[in-house]
Amino acid sequence: MKVVAIASYKGGVGKTTLTANIGAAIARLGRRVLLIDLDPQANLTFSFYQPEVWRTELAENRRTVKAWFESWRPETLPPPLAGYVTTPPVAATAVAERGGTLDLLASHLSLGDIEMNLAAHLGGAQAHRSTRHYFDVYQRLATGLASPGMSDYDLVLIDCPPHFGVMTRAAIAACDHVLIPARPDNFSALGIEHLLGKLRRYVWEYNRVADLQSGVHPAAKRLEPRVLGVVLMMVQYYRGQPTSFLRPHIHQAASLGVPLFESMVRLSTRSFAGSAETELPAVLSPDVPGDVVGELVDVVEEFLRRLAADARATA
Ligand SMILES: Nc1ncnc2c1ncn2[C@@H]1O[C@H](COP(=O)(O)OP(=O)(O)OP(=O)(O)O)[C@@H](O)[C@H]1O
Ligand SMILES: [Mg+2]
């Protein structure tokens, strides 16, 4: 099982879109995929469930990541994550032909309350200074992903909120790789640099606490998340090429010391606007133009190639 966190420091750059489309495309290839929505905006969840169905079937039935976090009691193992996972019916049918599955650990609009409680449990904003509850909080999701049934998944994709708070940190502690979507503009380059800085600092801090607490928490492994790359989303095209004024931004993104995906996804509002209604990511939708689907498929193929190359490099 590979775990990939999709993160950015900026909002609206395509994290959720990328999560849904990569997950759906890989499930359609016949793999078992779990998507985790860690964002209280719950956009990933609402791209697979109508709000009313989410309320009655997921929120009220406690089938959300919020309910999972709430059911945890200190000093005990968290309950198995599998009991909180759902299968979005429309998307699941669309990926089933080659035996693939697409499951979702849904978010909740009040997930922000959990994040605040977790931050309070850590000891406030200077949380990392107090190490007592550090792993209770940051390792919980990783422990959930090690619970029974989870190893059946080939791939877990975690859609993070657009900041580096407790949920994103928990996702980083649970992942093997980080994927960073970005829009080709100046601000995104700044956001990527900031995210990489936060990531480095957090990994350093986590590993320091892991060393300090190795007697108390022998299971706390050192983190070594690897940045799989930056995917440019919402790229404006002209005559089959990214428009010339975007090129400096693309090169800037390429110079940040993290790999830039060769494949990118064009700006096409029409292609992505309908997914909440159809409950199907664009890559599975018959209404989305072939060139956009082709770009998404290229991103997915490159994603799989990069994952495989990394697995070989670290074997
Ligand atoms: N290539 C694209 N062309 C046009 N619109 C797009 C494209 N990709 C995504 N969008 C749209 O842009 C909006 C933002 O995308 P998305 O929700 O994936 O970003 P995000 O990074 O998850 O945002 P947030 O930080 O708020 O979670 C959505 O309405 C989505 O449908
Ligand atoms: Mg999002």
Image (cartoon, rainbow, N blue to C red):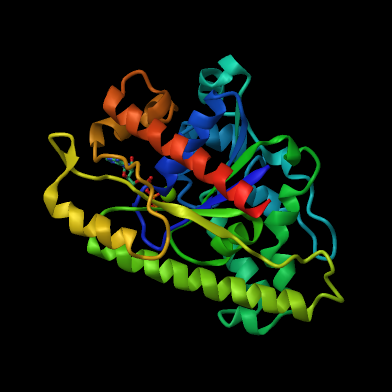
Residue at image position (86%, 75%) is 216
Residue 159 position (above or below residue 115):
above
Q: Is residue 259 left or right of residue 270?
A: right
- The residue most toward the top is 97
Q: Position of residue 173 (x, y in %)?
A: 64, 61
Closer to the camera, 216 or 274? 216
Q: Using the rendered view, name the quadrant where residue 106 is placed.
A: top right
Residue 239 position (above or below residue 11):
above
Residue 208 position (above or below residue 80):
below
Is residue 114 visible in the rendered structure shown here? no
Q: How many callouts does the rendering have?
A: 0
Closer to the camera, 141 or 28? 28
Closer to the camera, 138 or 176? 176
Residue at image position (64%, 84%) is 129
Is residue 264 visible in the rendered structure shown here? yes
Residue 13 position (above or below residue 221):
above
Q: Position of residue 227 (x, y in %)?
A: 50, 58
Residue at image position (61%, 76%) is 204
Q: Position of residue 76 (x, y in %)?
A: 85, 60
Q: Using the rendered view, name the quadrant where residue 223 is placed.
A: bottom right
Q: Position of residue 100 (x, y in %)?
A: 61, 24
Closer to the camera, 308 or 8? 308
Residue at image position (73%, 35%) is 152
Q: Is residue 235 left or right of residue 145?
A: left
Q: Using the rendered view, name the quadrant where residue 234 is placed.
A: top left
Question: Quadrant location of the N terminus?
Answer: top right
